[in-house]
């Protein structure tokens, strides 16, 4: 019974982390221009338009891809490693932003977030990294299996894609409302 409880807890942590990655990536895709503005505020030169646009597109696609792969269980050890590296990278970006660009608006969740980099944002980032550490440390012992049912895995991934579509739509709607209010 204890082993099952641990496995369920690890799955819930993994699913939550995957949901955050999918939501953050989808929301960034829904408002790429504001995320690009954040990148410029963090020091990516504005005259490197292609680099800014590329990063503004690559980061959310990476988040969505890792979130979907994490919940699917495909290549579990590799994906869990990549998620931990990504979360540590986000921690570093928040720390640098707090030190060098504290007045930059953090669009880590696209137009769903509209605050500046802060200690609260750092705490959130560190908490998500702690979840990634738990998932990383259990990568070989507790990889969630659906008993071989490819249909169940596909259904779960489709559910996350619907969730991503809803996050994109919410971010786009909020961005339109903010633009009209200005």
Image (cartoon, grey):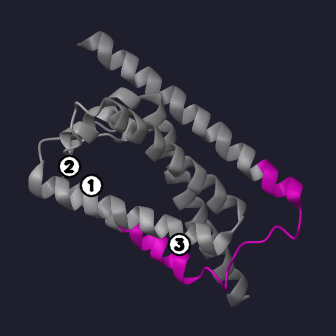
Q: Taking 55 as reference, is 156 left or right?
A: right
Q: Is residue 140 magenta?
A: yes
What kind of element bears circle 2? loop
| Residue 8, quarter of the rendered image | bottom right
Label 2 close to label 1 by CB (< 8 Å): yes
| Quarter of the rendering occupied by the N terminus | bottom right
Q: What span is in magenta?
A: 127-155
> In the rendered view, would you say 151 is above or below 127?
above
Q: CA distance from mark 1 to mark 3?
A: 23 Å
Instruction: Mark 2: give few (<14), some (14-19) or many (20+) Cα within 10 Å.
Output: many
- Tag 1 residue: 121
Q: CA distance from mark 2 to mark 1?
A: 6 Å
- Tag 3 residue: 81
Instruction: Mark 3: give few (<14), some (14-19) or many (20+) Cα within 10 Å.
Output: some
Residue 30 in picture, x, y percent from top left: 47, 29
**Which label is found at residue 117?**
2
Of residues 137 and 39, which is closer to you in this image? 39
Label 1 close to label 3 by CB (< 8 Å): no
What kind of element bears circle 3? helix
């Amino acid at each position: 019974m204890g082993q099952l409880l641990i496995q369920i807890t690890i799955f819930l942590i993994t699913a939550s982390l995957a949901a955050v990655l999918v939501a953050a990536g989808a929301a960034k895709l829904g408002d790429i221009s504001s995320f690009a503005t954040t990148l410029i505020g963090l020091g990516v030169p504005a005259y490197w338009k292609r680099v800014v646009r590329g990063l503004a597109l690559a980061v959310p696609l990476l988040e969505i891809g890792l979130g979907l792969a994490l919940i699917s269980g495909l290549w579990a050890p590799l994906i869990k490693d990549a998620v931990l590296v990504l979360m540590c990278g986000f921690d570093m970006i928040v720390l640098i932003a707090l030190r060098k660009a504290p007045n930059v608006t953090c669009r880590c969740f696209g137009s769903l977030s509209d605050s500046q980099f802060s200690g609260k944002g750092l705490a959130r980032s560190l908490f998500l990294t702690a979840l990634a550490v738990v998932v990383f440390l259990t990568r070989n012992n507790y990889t969630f299996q659906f008993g071989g049912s490819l249909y169940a895995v596909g259904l779960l991934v489709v559910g996350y894609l619907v969730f991503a579509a809803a996050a994109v739509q919410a971010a786009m709607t909020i961005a339109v409302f903010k633009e009209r209010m200005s």
